[in-house]
Amino acid sequence: MTKSHLLVDLDGTLLGLDIDRFLPVYLQQLATFVGEAVRLPDFSTRLMTAVATMVSSRGDRTTNEEAFYATFRAGLTSETSDACDRAFMTFYRDIFPTLRQHTRPVPGARSFVAAARRLGLHLILATSPVFPRFVIEERLGWAKIAPSDFDGITSFETCRHNKPDPLFYEEILRHFEIAPEAALMIGNDLRDDGAATQAGIDFAFVDGHYARRKNRAGNPVWSGSMLALARAIEGGDAPFVG
């Protein structure tokens, strides 16, 4: 069956970013900036505990945002919580954009998005929803891709599950009223993105410099570079796009 809905990963797929190198730099800068701004001695521990709670499989129906802040703010006064919120916003406004230097464009990414839009395909940015929406849009800007190119973007304000939990993909299908057989997940991680197959969604593996091949979760129906995928869609040669 041809696919009318394309779910697309961000980091390592549309944006050249080595997540194993990026995350430590990002978290260290965040911890240093916010920790010093609010003078909270246990900030780093509190931050990592909140992140762990957010990405874990939870039995409740809270959003990732709610799960993060419930853990992070536990035991804090309202004054300290407010100070942390202001420091977070300042960090993302002034410091986070400098991390762009650790990324690079992915050849074919912009052409792929443009070709998919010309064909009238439904595009959803199915990125790991552990960041606020505006931070995800900032990273899209690093890839020189507009948020408006997507019909939906996963973020921690709205999502209740995370990769590689199949419930993350089921949540997308349910929210956008998509039949799994009409969808294709496109990503560079055989585990996190390949887990879409457990929700009945076919998976296209973006191979190359940023490919993550550990712990395969599903067999891809297509494999190749993002540039090859863009050319296949532009030329009408992608077997899964009608």
Image (spheres, rainbow, N blue to C red):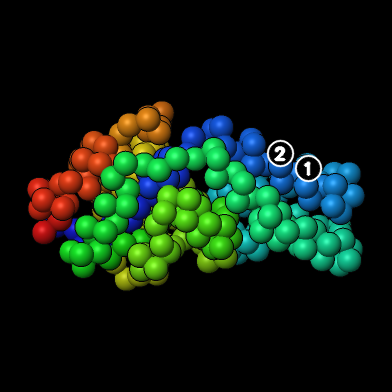
Q: Secondary structure at mark 2?
A: helix
Q: Quick check: 197 above or below 90? A: above
Crowdedness near tag 2: few (<14), some (14–19) or many (≥20) residues, C-alpha within 10 Å: few
Of the 4 image quadrants, the one containing the N terminus is bottom left
Label drawn at residue 116: none
- Front residue (pair 142, 4): 142
Q: Amino acid at mark 2?
A: Gln
Q: Secondary structure at mark 1?
A: helix
Q: Is residue 193 left or right of residue 201?
A: right
Q: Amino acid at mark 1?
A: Thr
* Residue in view at x 17 percent, y 52 percent: 233
Give the Cα separation between the discs numbered 2 and 1: 6 Å
- Front residue (pair 221, 98): 98
Q: Which residue is mark 1?
A: 32
Q: Is residue 209 left or right of residue 116?
A: right
Label drawn at residue 28: 2
